[in-house]
Image (cartoon, rainbow, N blue to C red):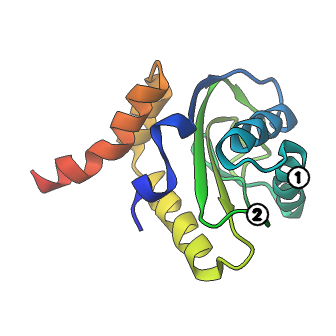
Amino acid sequence: MDLTDLIAPDSIICPLRANSKKQVLQELANKAQELTGLDARDIFETILQRERLGSTGIGHAVAIPHGKIDGINRIFGIIARLSSPVDFEAVDEEPVSIVFLLLAPENAGADHLKALALISRLVKDKAMLDKISYANDARSIYAILTEPAASNAA
């Protein structure tokens, strides 16, 4: 599984303007509706229900809200760089400025976990997170996300 299997250029929001965790999740659900055709309210409820189990704020200003939902046939990813950090009740108690949303089909057990692992590995790259934090638009973020394969080959 590669990041480009999950994230397309049109699935990046930069900047996302929101003042709260709930507002971030609503905006992500609206974008997911555009990409999947699913109802934004159903998407919002799915990711909010997961969030109630424990914050998906994993630290280092990053959150990975995720959930399984009926009606899609593959895993979808959305990345948002927030215009200003938002309290996400993260494990390190720091506000979040980069959010990776993952939506998976109900029956995508192993693939869902692989996608979460892929994003988790990605966010351990501090240099990449810094570049995303300063990116001005979606195109720049997509270039940043797709450049590691090229730079690792050099």
Mark 1 Cα within 10 Å, few/some/many (few <14, many 20+)?
some
Question: What is the three-letter code of the residue carrying label 1?
Answer: Asp
Quarter residue 75 falls in: bottom right
Q: How far across and down, in percent of the image, does residue 138 sit?
A: 48, 27
Q: Quadrant of the N terminus?
A: bottom left
Decide: few, some or many residues near mark 2? Use Cα within 10 Å; few <14, some 14-19, many ≥20.
Answer: few
Nearest the viewer among 36 and 134 is 36
| In this picture, residue 32 sits left or right of residue 43 | left
Q: Nearer the viewer, mark 2 or mark 1?
A: 2
Occupied quadrant, residue 53: bottom right
> Which of the two residues, 14 or 31, is positioned nearer the viewer here?
31
Looking at the picture, which amino acid does disc 2 mark? Gly
> On screen, 92 above or below 114?
above
Residue occupied by mark 2: 71
Res 99 label: none
Circle 1 residue: 42
Mark 1 secondary-structure assignment:
helix
Residue 74 found in image quarter: bottom right
Q: Position of residue 151 (x, y in %)?
A: 18, 47
| Relative image position of residue 148 (x, y in whole percent) | 28, 48
Q: How many marks?
A: 2
The secondary structure type at the circle numbered 2 is loop
Give the percent coordinates (x, y) of residue 92: 68, 49
Q: Which residue is rendered at x = 24% and y = 53% of the image?
A: 149
**In front: 154, or 36?**
36
Question: Compared with residue 106, is residue 123 higher up or lower down, i.e. above or below?
Answer: above
Alpha-carbon span between mark 2 and mark 1: 11 Å
> Looking at the image, is 72 positioned above or below residue 135?
below
Q: Mark 2 near mark 1, Cβ–Cβ under 8 Å?
A: yes
Q: On the picture, is 44 further left or further right than 17?
A: right
